[in-house]
């Protein structure tokens, strides 16, 4: 069967852009090199929409003011933003891992035979194996991960097993992805989860327990972990970030976020705004006790946006809207 997106040579790609769709290309040879290195799909398909006459019909061509170089600049800006966000989420991930490992060691034990015991974890969801073979739950999956790391010949697990005869939680957690650690957190008993939240927010656990019901703090942390993980995966796989919205991990209307962290109205929220954008990720990172993830993202976003706007100042409002970084709701200043 013939594909509706057949292979095109670099020269054919240039012809389509320049001659069929009237895109200005100031340096054709440089554009060919760029397409060869980074790909038509990544640059053009990924970032063309703001430059098209009709975003729903490529064949109507590009706006008179559009150029290949401008599209490539937006691609590079998004690449910088992706690196900024990934770095900040890695800082948060490390803080979250430390909070969980510390809470498990303090409230259960640092002994692997004790903190990996089935009784300390909820079962979670039930799953069926492929082709109907076997039934297992989320707890089974978590305990298998523990066991795999305990018996691993990779470092530092082998060293701790052979020299210390124990792998404490702060070592165990080093072999786990952000998603796996979130599973560990979610399957843990309420007292563990509450202690983790206490560590993350810098709030005494007794006070937190009293506030949790009214302010829905546990739900807030659960929502934010899902949103951060979705962006962590997006950035790690080279996805477009600047105008991304998560359809699955939208935040709920929770009092410590709205309007405390994000000054959005309920009407705007109900329209789907200020729930899962880059601006929401940045602003909610400020809720936590560790300021580095927020500060790092805010500073580098400002630096890279200001650099971009020196060449394309007309894009300011478009970008701030795409990222939901307007001064009213998110308090982000490019002046």
Image: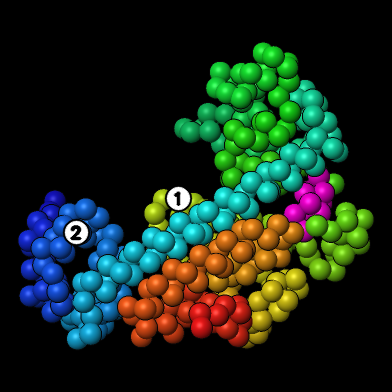
Majority secondary structure of magenta residues:
helix
User: In percent of the image, x 58 and y 45: which residue is there?
Assistant: 179
Kindly tell me whether residue 275 is visible in this rendering. Answer: yes
Q: Quadrant of residue 215?
A: bottom right
Q: Is residue 114 left or right of residue 87?
A: right
Q: Is residue 67 above or below residue 290?
A: below
Indicate yes or no whether the magenta region holds residue 196: yes
Q: Is residue 19 left or right of residue 257?
A: left
Residue in the image at 74% along x and 46% along y: 99
Q: Secondary structure at mark 1?
A: helix
Q: Quadrant of residue 322?
A: bottom left
- Relative vertical location of residue 277 with respect to residue 170 in this rendering, above or below: below
Q: Tell me if 116 is positioned left or right of 92 in this view.
A: right
**Residue shown at 27%/79% (left/top)?**
51
Residue that label 1 marks: 236
* Percent position of residue 328, x then y: 60, 85
Q: How is the image coloured?
A: rainbow
* Residue annotated with mark 2: 35
- Please, is residue 53 above or below residue 5 in the view? below
Residue at horizontal 79%, vertical 65%? 216
Give the x, y percent position of residue 128.
56, 36
State the mark number for residue 183. Answer: none
Range of the magenta residues?
192-201
Quadrant hosting residue 260: bottom right
268 left or right, relative to 197: left
Q: Position of residue 270 (x, y in %)?
A: 60, 80
Residue 148, magenta (yes or no): no
The span from disc 2 to disc 1 (Cα, nearest Å) is: 22 Å
- N-terminal label among 2 and 1: 2
Is label 2 in a helix, a strand or a loop?
helix
């Amino acid at each position: 069967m013939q594909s509706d997106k057949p292979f095109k040579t670099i020269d054919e790609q240039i012809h389509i852009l320049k001659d069929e769709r009237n895109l200005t290309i100031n340096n054709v040879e440089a554009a060919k090199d760029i397409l060869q290195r980074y790909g038509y799909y990544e640059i053009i398909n990924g970032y063309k929409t703001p430059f098209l006459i009709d975003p729903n019909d490529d064949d109507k061509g590009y706006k008179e003011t559009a150029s290949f170089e401008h599209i490539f600049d937006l691609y590079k800006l998004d690449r910088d933003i992706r690196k900024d966000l990934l770095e900040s989420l890695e800082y948060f991930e490390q803080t979250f891992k430390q909070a969980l490992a510390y809470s498990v060691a303090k409230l259960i034990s640092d002994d692997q035979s004790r903190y990996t015991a089935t009784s300390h974890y909820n079962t979670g969801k039930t799953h069926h194996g492929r082709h109907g073979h076997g039934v297992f739950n989320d707890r089974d999956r978590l305990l298998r991960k523990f066991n795999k790391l305990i018996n691993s010949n990779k470092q530092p697990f082998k060293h701790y097993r052979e020299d210390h005869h124990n792998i404490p939680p702060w070592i165990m957690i080093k072999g786990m992805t952000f998603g796996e650690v979130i599973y560990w957190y979610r399957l843990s008993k309420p007292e563990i989860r509450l202690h983790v939240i206490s560590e993350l927010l810098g709030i005494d656990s007794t006070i937190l327990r009293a506030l949790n019901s009214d302010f829905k703090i546990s739900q807030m942390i659960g929502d934010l972990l899902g949103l951060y993980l979705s962006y962590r995966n997006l950035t790690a796989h080279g996805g477009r970030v600047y105008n991304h919205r998560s359809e699955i991990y939208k935040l709920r209307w929770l009092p410590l976020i709205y309007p405390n962290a994000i000054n959005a109205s309920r009407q705007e929220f109900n329209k789907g705004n200020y729930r899962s954008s880059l601006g929401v990720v940045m602003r909610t990172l400020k809720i936590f006790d560790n300021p580095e993830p927020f500060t790092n993202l805010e500073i580098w976003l400002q630096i890279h946006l200001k650099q971009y706007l020196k060449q394309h100042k007309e894009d300011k409002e478009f970008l701030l809207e795409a990222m939901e970084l307007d001064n009213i709701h998110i308090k982000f200043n490019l002046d």
